[in-house]
Image: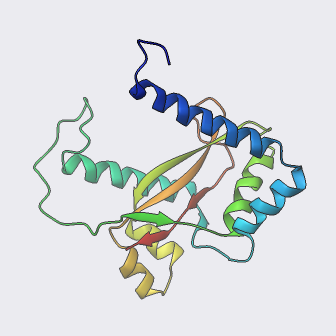
């Protein structure tokens, strides 16, 4: 060790080396082994999420932004916060997800003609709106009650390198709320 190098500066180097070694190991796997491992993660369980209309997902995302402004968590420069919120929202600690439906949805987005092999995915927080719940859970009062005013996470496909939502794309609601 050099005289001017401390153990504090070695930790990030060690972590980077560990990450690089793991990446090299994964990249060295034969494609069939990668596919088998990846499929083992997704196949066999239908999952907790679902493909959703991007306009409805955007309304949930906008609702999230609005609620955060009301709680002084997000205050854009063009809109001063109003009076503070006094209502309480149920907390969402985690959003879990599994399932082949998510894997297939991601692949479908990548192979749509509109994507032309140029799609990025972004995760966006949203709060379920009544319109969303009515449309996606018709007649299921238990699910509507469980999800009402809850934070969820949407996956949104974008044109690579831009902030433009992929034309013809859909959104994906991960949907597995905890607690």
**Image quadrant of residue 87?**
bottom left
Determine the residue positioned at 16% across, 41% down: 81
Which residue is nearer to you in this view: 52 or 119? Answer: 119
Q: Is residue 34 left or right of residue 127?
A: right
Q: Position of residue 137 (x, y in %)?
A: 50, 79
Q: Quadrant of the C terminus?
A: bottom left
Q: Nearer the viewer, residue 89 or 100?
A: 100
Give the percent coordinates (x, y) of residue 135: 51, 73
Q: In the drawing, does residue 140 fall left or right of residue 81?
A: right
Whether residue 69 appears in this view of the structure is yes
Residue 14: % across, % down: 54, 33
Q: Residue at x 25, y 30 (%)?
A: 78
- Above or below, 18 relative to 172: above
Percent x, y of residue 172: 59, 59
Residue 163 seen anywhere in this rendered image of the structure? no
Q: Quadrant of residue 178?
A: bottom left
């Amino acid at each position: 060790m050099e005289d001017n190098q401390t153990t504090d500066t070695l930790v990030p180097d060690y972590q980077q080396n560990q990450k690089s070694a793991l990446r090299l190991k994964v990249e060295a796997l034969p494609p069939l082994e990668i596919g088998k491992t990846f499929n083992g993660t997704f196949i066999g369980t239908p999952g907790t999420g679902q493909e959703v209309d991007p306009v409805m997902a955007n309304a949930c995302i906008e609702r999230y932004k609005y609620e955060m402004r009301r709680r002084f968590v997000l205050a854009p420069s063009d809109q001063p916060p109003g009076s503070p919120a006094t209502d309480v929202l149920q907390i969402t600690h985690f959003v879990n997800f599994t399932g082949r439906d998510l894997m297939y949805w991601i692949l479908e987005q990548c192979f749509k003609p509109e994507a032309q092999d140029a799609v990025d995915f972004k995760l966006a927080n949203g709060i379920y709106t009544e319109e969303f719940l009515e449309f996606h859970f018709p007649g299921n009062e238990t699910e509507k009650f469980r999800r009402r005013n809850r934070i969820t996470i949407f996956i949104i496909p974008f044109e690579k390198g831009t902030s433009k939502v992929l034309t013809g794309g859909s959104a994906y609601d991960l949907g597995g709320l905890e607690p």
